[in-house]
Image (cartoon, rainbow, N blue to C red):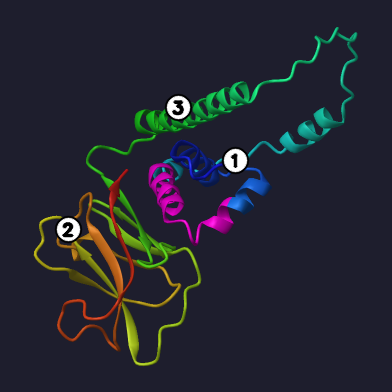
Amino acid sequence: MNLQDPEERSVAAAEYVLGTLDAAARAELEALLPSDAALRAEVYAWQDRLLPLATRGPAAEPDASLWPRIAERIARPAPSAPPSPMPAAQSATPAANDALWRSQRRWRATALLSMAATVALAAVLVLRPPETQVRYITLLQAPETQRTGWVVEATSGERIRLVPIEAGAAVPAGKSLQFWTKPQGADRPTSLGLVQPGTRLELPVERSPGLGAEQLFELTLEPQGGSPTGLPTGPILFVGRSVRL
């Protein structure tokens, strides 16, 4: 992979998020992520595009007979066929190789974008909730490392759910983890309560002064018991903005 090429970097990031990279390419990409800001940005962009699609439909269990059928098909000997005459080998020029490689990159990019668009269209047409119920999702990421540590899922008229996706570090003695939100146009953040590291939190959506796209959610480190001022005073540990599903 040439991850300095913007087109190939975007394709590799998409394949990484989809889980279709082979083991060697995945290891190479993961080794570069900590030091390559452009690559991280591509990965986060593809996560933002594709993660909401994974939450639209219920999980499906494959039929119990699927794996035995696959194993039987793999073990089945291939049908014999008469040998075909092989054309004389020709050595490709460097220019031809480069053109072929670029063509393959464009095909992979087009295929990935088409697949994402198809899934998105199917989700919108088939699995969309009633218009009166709007859902939003927010990835909360560490500002310095861009590591995703929490997901906020909010549904209009229902609840806001803060869900950890990692165990999380312990809060220092004398400190508390506090959950905040700030809708678009609001003049100040609103506290949604204290959070235990690695623990799910659910609260009525009415606790928030509003709910919409591009709404800010964040977790800050505050004095024990929460901010004494009613506003964030400590460092931001995780932050993100909502996306409408």
* Amino acid carrying mark 2 in the image: Pro
Residue 99, position as x, y percentages in the image: 56, 23
Q: Amino acid at mark 1?
A: Thr
> Label 3, on which residue?
114
Tell me the quadrant of the picture where the C terminus can be found: top left
Question: How would you rate the neighbour count of disc 2 (Cα within 10 Å): few for under 14, some for 14-19, many for 20 or more?
Answer: many
The label number, if any, that marks residue 183 in the structure image: 2
Q: Residue at x 28, y 37 (%)?
A: 130
Q: Nearer the viewer, residue 168 or 14?
A: 14
Identify residue type, mark 3: Ser
Depth check: give the residue in front, 11 or 154.
11
Q: CA distance from mark 3 to mark 1?
A: 15 Å
> Mark 1 to mark 2: distance in Å?
36 Å
Q: Nearer the viewer, mark 2 or mark 3?
A: 3
Left or right: 84 with respect to 114?
right
Residue 135 sits inside the magenta stretch: no
Q: Which residues are magenta?
A: 29-51
Question: Circle 1 is placed at which residue position?
Answer: 20
SS at mark 1 in the image: loop
The chief SS type of the magenta part is helix
Dividing the picture into quadrants, the one containing residue 87 is top right
Q: Residue at x 20, y 51 (%)?
A: 212
